[in-house]
Image (spheres, rainbow, N blue to C red):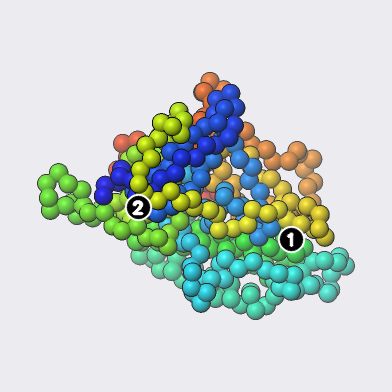
Amino acid sequence: MSALSVKSMIVFEDQGSGIGGRPSVHLITSPNCDSCPMVKSGPQQVRAREDGRYFAEDFTSYPQLFTEEFGYNSVVLRRPSDPHHPLQPLWWTPTEQDHNMDRGSMFSGLGTLAPSHVDCFTKLQGQLSARAKKHHEERRLQHSLMHSLERSLRYCLERLTSLPCTFKDLVGQVAEFQRVYLDLLSWLDFEQEFAPRWTSAWSEIPNESPPPIKADSSRMGAYTTQADTVQWLYGAGIPVWFVRHIESSDSATILDVPHEILYPTSSSKDWMNNGEPDPFPTIYNGPAGPRRQTVVKRMGSFLANAADLSGDPPVSQTPEVGPTRPPETGPTRSTKGHGRPMPCKSIQNVLCTKL
């Protein structure tokens, strides 16, 4: 099979996302996966759910649009099926029994994470920080996103141990630690394992690319509207989906391939407080792309029960569309970098100021 062949496909009608509010129909295919995600175009609200994760907008729960800034998240780990996998705690959600109440506080309802879970997270953080340090010593990176992620991981752990908060915020902060851990882990895996595959030797056969590597089903993968990105990810063994806009479902050629839908691995339900809806705040409202991905990565910036002393209105971002551009009818990616030697920026050149 080639990068533009079809191993699986779905035709997805995105209600009200087209021009004039009409449905937008997407043809989603994959050359190396047996199921496809449902890709929604246009603005989407981003907020944490009952498990502290951002549901379909969270790169640890669902494939995201491949971008030059955060393409390394295409190799983030999926939740292992083995219940005894050493990284299973990264998908654990605390219960109220894990909220260690602060008896010395003048305020009720505040507490920190139970010591047994702190110990588990401390061990995981130490192992990953040691791996990042070794990578730095071997490469001598300067101003690397890796340094920012490693520091954020330590700060997340410190908040879990030293910052008494409500149970709702504890759930969010645990998910934040898990998300930052998986973010840093995917950065290292991408740099050390996947990116080198793009600089491997040429094929022995003239005018042919090196044989593709079998897709690593333990990785999240990414979707794209760019044919060249499909080829790059396919060649590196990264799950990839090609999204195209079509006029109607009738115009799609239905092939004899699996038509299974891939669903997010986290909860879609909002937070409930004594049986009443009490959702986490919306932190962004806009389409897929680097801006939305950046907001999801703002470590520790969105405590649900933090006081707002600014007087500013709630966060609301407009879509990434300029006033002179036509409405977007499908997921898009920045056009800068076309003709690039690789499908994303050299990762060590993405500065911590992106966050």
Residue occupying the point 43% across, 38% down: 27
Please count the marks in the image.
2
Q: Please report the residue visible at 38 percent of the width from the left and 40 percent of the height from the top.
A: 254
Q: Quick check: 229 left or right of 292?
A: left
- Looking at this rendering, what residue extends furthest in the top direction? 324
Residue 4 pos. (x, y %): 31, 43
Mark number for residue 2?
none
Few, some or many C-alpha atoms within 10 Å of disc 2 (few <14, some 14-19, many ≥20)? many
281 left or right of 62? right
Relative to 263, residue 28 above or below: above
User: Residue at image x 64%, y 66%?
Assistant: 93
**Which one is earlier in the sequence, the residue at label 1 or at label 2?**
2
Quadrant of residue 51 in the image? bottom right
The three-letter code of the residue at mark 1 reads Lys
Front-most of residues 95 and 8 = 8
Residue 333 image offset from top left, x and y in percent: 45, 37
Q: Secondary structure at mark 1?
A: helix
Q: Taking 237 as reference, is 108 above or below it?
A: below
Q: Which mark is residue 168?
A: 1
Tell me if 141 is positioned left or right of 275 in this view.
left
Q: Is residue 271 visible?
A: yes
Q: Nearer the viewer, residue 85 or 338?
A: 85
In this orientation, which residue lies closer to the viewer: 321 or 250?
A: 250
Three-letter code, disc 2 = Asn
Residue placed under numbered mark 2 in the picture: 32
Q: Position of residue 44 (x, y in %)?
A: 61, 40
* Residue 298 location (% of width, % of height): 60, 51
